[in-house]
Image (spheres, grey):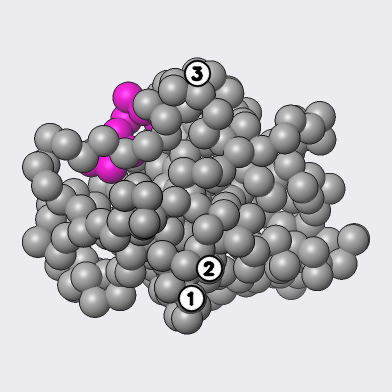
Amino acid sequence: MRVTDMTSKQAQHFVLIHGIGGGAWCWYKLRCLMENSGYKVSCIDLTSGGIDRSDASSVKSFDEYSKPLTDFLSELPENQKVILVGHSAGGLSVTQASHRFAKKIELAVYVAATMLRLGFMTDQDRMDGVPDLSDFGDVYEVEFGADQRPISAVIKKEFQRKIIYNMSPLEDSTLAAMLLRPGPLRAIRSAQFSATSDIDKVPRVYIKTMHDNVVKPAQQEAMIRRWPPSDVYVLESDHSPFFSTPFLLFGLLVKAAASVGCH
């Protein structure tokens, strides 16, 4: 590789955002691939995710949930831009960040992710963006608040591989079963954003996962139709392409970054 190529790649900074119940750990394969190729990579633990010590049931608002990403972008120098990559519910954090920090975001990438311009504002938003796992039966462990509304949830261990990691290596689904934590359902479902003109200045790419049992392909397609991104890529993957197809996901992220002329 030429020195000029490596220097250019080092200037590209990917920030990876996990989905509900996950953490920075879920990107370990992708992080290795990217850093070994000269890219800068930051993996964020959202509040109550990964090694963050917060309890999911204590997270009351979406702003609180996404605060680690908000803090990261606030501290980023004004002359630096990043490529945000959100998986699953992490797409909501990417959208919120795009509203607030449009000038610092070179590209927003949604990987099997919830992509709603203003968050869960309408019944249609909920239909498109909220996973419907009813076909699998009673799959959630749920904690309820005093008002009997769900405040946190996690998919039961016996269902995780079948639903989330159906094409992933057994080693990875085993690791995930040890690390997945309840997600702050109340906080995530409260996500809504004020309309801003700047968000339309942020290029968006969607990566569809065609064997996804969580955010199903039809839901992904509905969100793409309603808020069309500049490009759509397709993976023959389950909901967790960072495990099941990491090399292909890496290739698409590099292609997406190149398509918007990142420097």
Q: Nearer the viewer, residue 244 or 224?
A: 224
Residue that numbered label 3 is attached to = 225
**Residue drawn where x is 63% and y is 68% of the image:** 68
If you read the primary sequence from the N terminus, does the residue marked by circle 3 or circle 2 appear first?
2
Image coordinates for residue 212, horizontal then vertical, percent: 27, 40
Image-based side of 180 in relation to 17, left or right: left
Tell me the amino acid under the disc marked 2: Thr
Find disc 1 in the rendering and name its residue.
Answer: 54
Q: Residue at x 73, y 42 (%)?
A: 99
Instruction: Tell which circle, 2 or 1, labels the residue nearer the N-terminal end.
Output: 2
Q: Secondary structure at mark 1?
A: loop
Callout 1 environment at 10 Å: few (<14), some (14 to 19), or many (20+)?
Answer: some
Q: Name the kind of residue labelled 1 in the image.
A: Ser
The residue carrying pointer 2 sits among few (fewer than 14), some (14 to 19) or many (20 or more) residues within 10 Å by Cα, namely many
Seen at 53% across and 68% down, the residue is 47
- Whether residue 215 appears in magenta in the rendering, the answer is yes
Which label lies toward us, 3 or 2?
2
Residue 249 appears anywhere in the view: no
Q: Which residues are magenta?
A: 213-220
Is residue 35 at least partly visible in the picture? yes
Q: Looking at the figure, which quarter contains the N terminus?
A: bottom right
Q: Is residue 114 above or below residue 44?
A: above
Residue at image mark 2 = 47
Type of amino acid at the residue the image marks with label 3: Arg
Side (left or right) of 151 relative to 90? left
Q: Residue 208, image x and y in percent?
A: 40, 36
Given residues 59 and 128, the one toward you in this image is 59
Lower position in the chain sequence, tag 1 or tag 3? 1
Q: Quadrant of residue 20?
A: bottom left
- Tags 2 and 1 touching, CB below 8 Å: yes
